[in-house]
Amino acid sequence: MAKFERIYRWLPVWTQNLLVSIYGRYWHWARFGGNYQQHEDSYRQREGFSDDEWEAWQKKRLKDLVGICVRHVPYYKKAWSQETWQAALKGELSALPLLEKTALRQDSGQFLRQDQKPLIKFPFHTSGSTGTPISVVYTLSELRNSLALREVRSANWAGVSFDEPRATFSGRIIEHDPDEETHIYRYNRPEKQIYFSAFHLKPETAPRYVEALWQHGTKWLTGYAVSYYLLAKFILAQGLQVPALKAVITTSEKVTPQMRETMQQAYGCRVFEEYSTVENALFASECEAGRLHVSPDVGIVEILHPDGSPCLPGEGGEVVTTCLARSYQPLVRFRLGDLAAWDPEPCPCGRNMPVIKEVVGRIEDVVTGPDGRQLVRFHGIFVDQPNVVKGQIIQETLDTFSVRVVPSPNFGETDVENIIQRMKQRLGDNVQVVVETVSEIPLTKAGKFRAVISKVR
Ligand SMILES: [Zn+2]
């Protein structure tokens, strides 16, 4: 792939578009060919399950999965004692140990089942906060399964479909020149899909993004929440006209109420949130009633206290999931590194699928105050700060913070004081805060924007 990217980089844009389309045709087959339709039908059918049907379905799947793990997967053969997996076979999932991301990171091959040798494999790499990649391997059928899931539970719930033209913001590097301002996207014709570059988004390039939506008759948007939020801010500030869109489905980052409002205003349509992982170990999507339902056929999701006991509805805890949608590389009681809570209120839409009340944030983005309290969603500091184009908070030590700001022309001393005051309000008067203005805040390797970085563990 690296070789391909080196060649791609030197080709003219029209050839890049052609290549993207050829690549797109292959991917279209890989994603929507073969047994894709079957997957779609079964996701639709299970949506009407009662609580008992879900329980029975999960129990059967778990039993099969544990059987595969103890017979064919080197990691679990070594890591699990006989008593624990026998208890798990009876449905006592809590008997099994939690799985750390580091185990998968160290040797993801140990998690592949030995009795299958798929002809085509689809590896996906995630960089993670430590920068060490995790390799997640899908089979062809698992890939189609994951797409069918997104069509039925995400796109359809939002009133759209993969058949309609869409635009995507992701971590793909589609343009290597960081100063390029015209060719900020590539077009995949077979899927009528625009790939936007998350790396080139700034006030000067925003009109190009909007033009692309007009040019390709885009009906819905999907991908990185923060990228769409930033684009929305530029659209509103510059008064840009956006074509009629049906929905924005955000992935990746948590959407705050303020982000949602800004996006809905700029794009003139509803924002639907999707909470999922590259491992496809957990999938939650927003229904028409605005609640985030977990799909029980994707994974068995647990929310746990630090001592490992299950949280009651409404109590925040750590998200642990056992992946049922993929079994070539089984993940059992996988610690995602997210904090969330179950919603005690049933959803008026009537689906018997558990509702997650709040995905509070990534554990890695939690800021720890000098008095030990843990604060999440810290980027709230920048809410209603019209002169902050982008902001990032870095916790250097327990009581020192740097705040990086990409300022608008009107940014001044009052804004700096306001930020410092807000930080002290949340963390106490004894913290030291340095605000620096920068021209750009670099994205992570995966093209994601991190609003909060804590160097304190
Ligand atoms: Zn609902």
Image (cartoon, grey):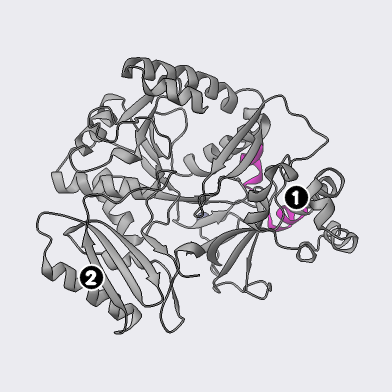
Residue 300 in the magenta stretch? The answer is no
| Residue assigned mark 2 | 419
Q: Is residue 372 above or below residue 18?
A: below
Give SS at disc 1: helix
Q: Residue drawn at (73%, 39%), measured in percent from left and top?
A: 328
Q: Position of residue 221 (x, y in %)?
A: 37, 39
Under tag 2, what secondary structure?
helix
Q: Is mark 2 within 8 Å of ligand 1?
A: no
Please provide the residue range marked out in magenta: 42-57
Q: Quadrant of residue 317?
A: bottom right
Residue 200 showing in the rendered view: yes
- Near-viewer residue (6 or 262): 6
What residue do we see at 37% from left, 51% from top?
449
Asked whether 49 falls inside the magenta stretch, the response is: yes
Q: Left or right: 325 with respect to 422?
A: right
Left or right: where 53 falls relative to 379:
right
- Residue in the picture at 59% in, 25% down: 30
Crowding at mark 2 (Cα within 10 Å: few <14, some 14-19, many 20+)? some
Q: Is residue 443 above or below residue 357?
A: above
Residue bearing mark 1: 57
In this rendering, the label closer to the viewer, 2 or 1: 2
